Structures are given as structure tokens and as C-alpha cells.
Amino acid sequence: MGKKWMTAVIAAALSVVMASSAFAGTWENQEGRWKYHNDDGSYAAAQWVEDQGTWYYVEQDGFMKTGWFQDGAGVWYYFDENTGAMVSGTTRNIGGTDYTFDGSGAWVQPQVRLNDGWNGTTYVNRLVGYQITLPDSYQAVSGNTVSLPEEAQYDMVASAPDGNSIIVTAIINMSELDGENWSDEELAYYFKYIYRSESDVIGASFNDLGFAKITLIQSEEGIADVYFKRCGSYVLMIETVFIPSRWQEIDDILHTMKIPN
């Protein structure tokens, strides 16, 4: 009863605050979700909104953002799930993990190293915003078992017990390549050049994550594929190496990829 009462109080307080006029507009409740109505009659969309000293973010569909948000520069922010207010200047426990946010609201990211981010068999990285779940039998292994571009930093490397399938995730900071403004075509050319590949670049999608894919090897002895996806100022790269009979297993693993909650 106490929790339900507290939730009702929060909702009532939020309704009073949001219904009041702000400096440049008014919050409007539409079936339990909030939109920001500008004083010129338009609705805010895909933009930050400051209201009485508190920052909010309005998504492309016009509704207030809650939970995690990554801006175009790859910086992560968190918006309170009840009020939508940006969390800043504090440490908050989210989903059982403590996250620290600086005065601007940016998540202060820990050093990313191999095996950081494991939660059971799921690997989570909020720097570029992905998680992937591996079979119980897979084990984290040394990064020197595979070959990556010099600019890439290993994030997660795991292998089946018999070594006949390996999956690697790596991160490339595009600013180190002066590649922040590269087009998708230029990025694809970079990977084809690095891997000396003549393969066509095709699209691949796993849940809510879309990648480009290059096949490096496809033979009766083995298959090697590279997937890559732009994430703000970074590129998330996945390399898979496996024997043909492991194709379905690798595909199932890739389809566990999603943006963390």
C-alpha cells in the first residue's frame, strides 16, 4: 500500500509541475506520456528542453525521454524514469549497478577493459550502447587469438570450448582516424581496405541494432565475417570466425545483441 501511495503522490506532483507554464512553453500529458508545447504552437522534437533549471530530452516522436540516452557525440545521459529529469552531479543505482554522472549529466565512464561489463553470460557496454549474451559454454579468451585493425581496441573476446567458433567485439575511436565525418561509404571502404576484402558490403540487423557486413572467408573449412556500426564518434565492430556447422549458433548469438535497458 505504501509503494502505491508514493507512486500516486509522485504522479500527482508531476502533473502539477508539468501542467504549469514554463519560460518557453508548456508540458502536455497525452495518454500518460509528456510532450512539450512551444509558445509558438509547435511541439518540441529531437531536442533538449530546459524547464525551471532542470533539463529534459524530447525524442523525435515528440515525447519526453526517460532512461538512458546517447547523444551524437557518444555521451550517455540518464533521465529519471518517473519525472524525465536529467540525472546529474550524483551517483545512482540503476538496475543494480552504480553509475556516476558529472555536473553536466554525462555518465562518467569507467575504463573499458576485457571482461568489464559481464553480468553472468551477458556482456554490457554502455560506451557504444550494446549488450550480447553468450552460451554458458563460451569462455572469455585472450585478444591475441584473433587479428583486428591496429586502431581497434578489444572489448569482448569469447570462444567455444573447442575453439571452433570465436566472437569478438571491438571499438574504434573515429577521432583518432580523423574519421568523425566519414560517410557510410567511406567507412565501408576503410574496412574493406583494412581486411583486403573484395566482398560486397551488405546490411545486417540484430534486434534494434543495424550493421554493415563484410565476409572475409567463406569455405568448407571456415567462415569469417566482420560487422560494423557507427555509434556516435565510435564504431562498434564484431568479428566472427567459425566452422560452417556453427553457423546457426553464431547467428543465434548475434541475435541476442540489443541496446541495454
Image (spheres, rainbow, N blue to C red):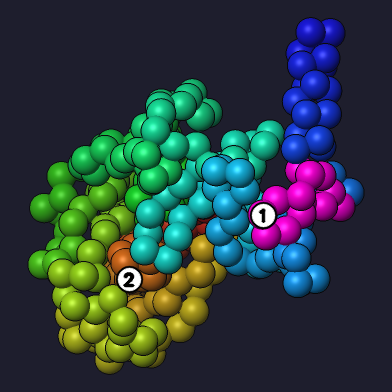
Q: Position of residue 129 (x, y in %)?
A: 43, 53
Q: Amino acid at mark 2?
A: Val
Q: Amino acid at mark 1?
A: Phe
Q: Magenta stretch?
A: 18-30
Tell which tag, 1 or 2, sits nearer the viewer: 1
Q: Nearer the viewer, residue 239 or 63?
A: 63
Q: Residue at x 76, y 49 (%)?
A: 21
Provide the secondary structure element on which disc 2 rests: strand
Report if residue 22 lies within the magenta region: yes
Please give the residue where the numbered disc 2 appears in the rendered image. Answer: 226
Can residue 162 be seen from the camera position used here? no
Contact between marks 1 and 2 (CB within 8 A): the answer is no
Q: Residue furthest front?
A: 23
Q: Position of residue 73 (x, y in %)?
A: 36, 63
Please give the residue where the numbered disc 1 appears in the rendered image. Answer: 23
Q: Position of residue 59 (x, y in %)?
A: 64, 61
Can residue 2 be seen from the camera position used here? yes
Horizontal side of 61 relative to 198 (left or right) equals right
Q: Position of residue 177 (x, y in %)?
A: 17, 75
Q: Residue at x 28, y 76 (%)?
A: 180
